[in-house]
Image (cartoon, rainbow, N blue to C red):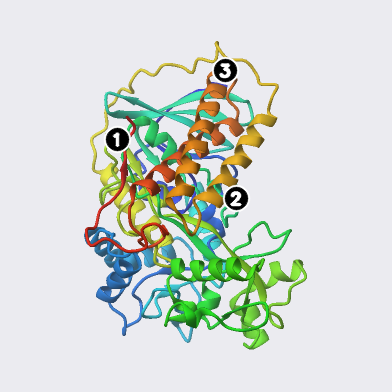
Amino acid sequence: MTNNYQFDVLIIGSGAAGLMSAIQLSEKLSIAVIAKDKVLEGSSYYAQGGISAVLDPEDNFESHILDTINTGFNLGSEESIRFMVEQAPLAISDLENAGVKFSHINNNYDLTTEGGHSSKRVAHVADKTGQSIQVNLLAKVKQKNNITLFEQYVAVDLLVNEGNCNGAYVFNKNTKEVGTFSSHKTILATGGASKSYLYTSNPDTSTGDGIAMAYRAGCHITNMEFTQFHPTCLFHPHAKSFLISEALRGEGAKLLLPDGKEFMHKYDSRLELAPRDIVARAIDNEMKVNGYDCVYLDISFKDANWIKSRFPTITKRCHELGIDICNEALPVVPAAHYTCGGIDTNLDAQSNISNLYAIGEVAHTGVHGANRLASNSLLECIVFAKSCAKDINESVFEEIFPAIAEWDASRVAPSKEKVVLSHLWSEIRLIMWNFVGIVRSDNRLNSANLKIQQINKEVDEYYRVYTVTDDLIELRNLAQTSKIIVESALSRKESRGLHYNQDYPNQLKKIHNTVMIKS
């Protein structure tokens, strides 16, 4: 079987953004969708909470826009935010047309409130919204004869020549070979980079692949210092950072210390419904000051049947771990959750490299600023997947594909020291958690910078000498992305949103983005 393919459009990533763009693209185009694992294994599938949109007659666009701007600490682009918010109701309709059945009460959307929202505007499918979106979008993709799915394929590097993207080198995890996917248009929909941290709510696929590839290719990477830490992941040795949806707090759940006392009143008047950065720092502070391993989230005062109906996924998983959320509080800790920065794009999802687009968490569209408003992530995926597809559909395609050099593996050999990879992987994640976490300082950031730079040198040397594997590809991307995060954090001399530096506790009046460009 050939290792070299040609498609009009190459989509790298199979989450909500990638699948939605595939559906929206013209059926006249040949399309490849690359999934590094199974198609449904990714952050979109595990998104529990919902998708924000103005669907209540008492709500309005201006309120949603203002909530997004305020939560992002005025660093977001009002143009991008307005575009996303005004497209949100149509995005909900598009998902319903794809088969997604949002929860209703009395023929109305069962809208809920989450942190940072001033109105009930989060539509959901119980507590498995992402799963429903993914399953239904995938079913639509499989109905289209012009779309080919490639599971267990990992992109290695983008094929860029004179500022133009012509596809990518891609590693086949089954055959262990690298092939070429040449394309007229390439869409990066690879998700975020929260696997850079020791504790994360994300699946193993979130290793910053698209961000690292784009950076190496010459893309502008913006605001990578803003990693959102979700305040409430289940604290259990066998839970693997299972996410406890913010929707619990939206429905009234209380955060408690081990002695049962509430504490959010000490940090914000909005209590449990304060934006995620405030809640995560509050929990982090209580744990550090008092030496707690975790805090607790309690919704047991609600009716048991209602809890099981509203949160079936969480109820079931906790029950499997011996926790009855109907009768006891859940042990929770913060964990790295979402990458607010990424590849800089315009409203059509175009990067600064011709024919290269970025959508979803891998992109920096300007809608999140210094902190993401809850449930704006799935919305961003759908809205910008559509604008991306529209731009591509209106493009003129060349009939001839550019000549691409085949992958050369003649100068490398299989490694007999795979323990090095696992050691470096663990070292990066520990450094990021301890030195570039929820609360930062210049001293810790400088220390992390030296350590991460050295690791990048070791990884680059390893990459030049040994045969490519999927583990090596991910490690290389993880190291590169971690380096960008640290350098971005060092360059911001203030505390804003998700970036809190003890040496610069105040917020500057002048608003600026941090843009990393490969020298």
Residue extending furthest toward the top: 410
Question: Which mark lies nearer to you, 1 or 2?
Answer: 2
* 200 relative to 372 in the view: left or right: right
| Residue 480 image offset from top left, x and y in percent | 47, 36
**Quadrant of the rendered structure where residue 261 is?**
bottom right
Mark 3 closeness class: few <14, some 14–19, many ≥20 residues within 10 Å: few
Residue extending furthest toward the right: 322
According to the image, label 2 marks what residue?
A: 198
x 38%, y 40%: residue: 187
For residue 424, above or below residue 346: above
User: Whole-Å distance between the Cαs marked 2 and 3?
Assistant: 28 Å
In primary-sequence order, the first of circles 1 and 2 is 2
Which element carries disc 3, helix, strand or loop? helix
According to the image, label 1 marks what residue?
A: 355
| Residue 50 image offset from top left, x and y in percent | 48, 68
Q: What is the three-letter code of the residue carrying label 1?
A: Asn
Q: Quadrant of the N terminus?
A: top right
According to the image, label 3 marks what residue?
A: 465
Mark 2 closeness class: few <14, some 14–19, many ≥20 residues within 10 Å: some
